[in-house]
């Protein structure tokens, strides 16, 4: 005759390991956002890329006999407390100290992450800053609201508090009011529905320098930023309008496809882009009805005689816009005549945000600088 007792914790082990695995993936992504955001295979994709992120493999804790340790034994000396260091590994740990080691390293594998899931992590705490109420509210923002509790659902939506209460209530009816013998009938799951709310209208004007001074690196960085900006706006806000303006000595409104693919050359007259943006705002987007966000990326080189006019137009845009963002892409030393040096001396406004980008890793901080929530901002 044999007596056995079922260990029901084993039934949940797969789910627990899956949750732990997903958390490790999220942690690895967050630690590498600077590199991931500016990856070329994502920027040049059609928006359906599966991103591969290196993850350190997970192993269960276990005891292992080390035959190489000759000067230690397996028992303690007594008097030890939690946290005391009882020993240290040798220097030859396979980390590569100038000579070949004989110890195993860590195993890594590439976890595949959908681009939509990656975008959700990047945009989770971002929003249009300084969003104000306007006369007409046509901008739709989508949010998720938990509305009900049900007996069936997916484990990720398990309401632990309600589940524990149901278990205690069931046991109380048997004269034993405590948490014990959890059954499937005790489980309670949160259900949710998508909620659409209407916010004030918003239009974003994306301006990019495509003159001859903008090299391959500069154009790539500008397009990288705008790639994520466009994805962020369309993920968070349903009906936000985005306009695209490219310029050299002359500015013109272009399609999204032309903006991200077409190259130009020639000199640089930045004021032409700002003037076109102002003309478009006056003709189509009244500041009394629209929240307006112009953004401009350039290498900072401009006709010296045009700098004063740029300052005047930026101040005019700031007076009617919620925020003006300027990004300067330049590797190495910044000459005194660049737009960044002029703007830093001439423009003083909380609505003016300027960033400098020297390498690909600066794209993500730039995104956060422009779209971090400020007073009066709302996020879906």
Image: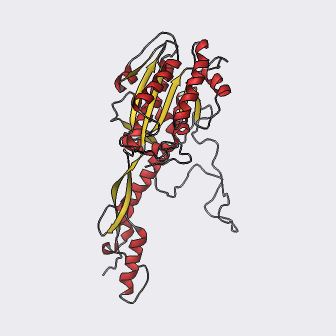
x, y (%) of residue 249? 49, 13
Of residue 298 and residue 33, the one placed in the foreground of this image is 298
Of residue 326 and residue 98, the one placed in the foreground of this image is 326
- Which residue does the image show at 59% across and 42% down from the upper left? 93
Residue sitting at the far right: 79
Quarter of the rendering containing residue 205: top left
Residue 292 horizontal side relative to residue 353, left or right: left
Quarter of the image with the N terminus is bottom left
Q: Is residue 4 above or below residue 208?
A: below
Q: Is residue 376 visible?
A: yes
- Which residue does the image show at 39% across and 90% down from the upper left? 175
x, y (%) of residue 280? 42, 27
Of residue 156 and residue 352, the one placed in the foreground of this image is 352
How does the figure colour the protein chain or chains? secondary structure
x, y (%) of residue 336? 67, 18
Residue 53 horizontal side relative to residue 88, left or right: left
Q: Is residue 250 above or below residue 11?
A: above
Q: Is residue 322 above or below residue 69?
A: above
x, y (%) of residue 102? 55, 39
Q: Is residue 114 visible?
A: no
Of residue 310 and residue 109, the one placed in the foreground of this image is 310
């Amino acid at each position: 005759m044999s007596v056995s007792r079922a260990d029901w914790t084993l039934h949940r082990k797969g789910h627990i390991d899956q949750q732990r695995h997903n958390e490790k993936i999220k942690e690895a992504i967050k630690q590498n956002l600077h590199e991931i955001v500016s990856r070329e295979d994502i920027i040049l994709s059609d928006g359906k890329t599966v991103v591969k992120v290196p993850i350190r493999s997970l192993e269960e804790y276990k005891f292992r006999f080390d035959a190489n340790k000759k000067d230690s034994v397996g028992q303690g000396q007594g008097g030890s407390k939690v946290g005391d260091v009882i020993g240290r590994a040798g220097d030859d740990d396979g980390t590569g100290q100038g000579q070949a080691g004989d110890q195993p390293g860590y195993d890594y594998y590439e976890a595949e992450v959908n681009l939509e899931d990656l975008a959700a992590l990047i945009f989770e705490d971002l929003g249009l800053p300084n969003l104000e109420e306007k006369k007409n509210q046509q901008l739709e923002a989508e949010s998720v609201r938990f509305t009900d509790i049900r007996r069936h659902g997916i484990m990720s939506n398990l309401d632990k508090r309600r589940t524990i209460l149901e278990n205690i209530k069931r046991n109380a009816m048997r004269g034993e009011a405590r948490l014990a013998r959890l059954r499937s009938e005790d489980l309670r799951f949160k259900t949710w529905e998508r909620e659409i709310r209407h916010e004030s209208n918003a239009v974003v004007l994306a301006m990019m320098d495509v003159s001859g001074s903008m090299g391959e690196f500069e154009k790539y960085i500008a397009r990288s930023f705008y790639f994520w900006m466009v994805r962020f706006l369309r993920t968070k806000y349903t009906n936000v309008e985005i306009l695209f303006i490219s310029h050299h000595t002359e500015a013109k409104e272009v399609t999204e496809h032309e903006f991200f693919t077409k190259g130009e050359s020639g000199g640089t007259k930045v004021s032409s882009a700002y003037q076109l943006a102002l003309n478009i705002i006056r003709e189509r987007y009244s500041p009394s009805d629209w929240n307006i966000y112009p953004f401009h990326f350039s290498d900072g080189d401009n006709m010296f005689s045009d700098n004063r006019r740029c300052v005047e137009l930026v101040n005019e845009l700031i007076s009617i816009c919620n925020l003006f963002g300027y990004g300067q892409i330049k590797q190495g030393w910044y000459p005194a005549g660049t737009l960044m040096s002029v703007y830093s001396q001439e423009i003083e406004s909380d609505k003016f945000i300027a960033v400098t980008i020297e390498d690909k890793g600066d794209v993500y901080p730039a995104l956060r600088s422009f779209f971090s929530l400020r007073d009066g901002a709302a996020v879906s």
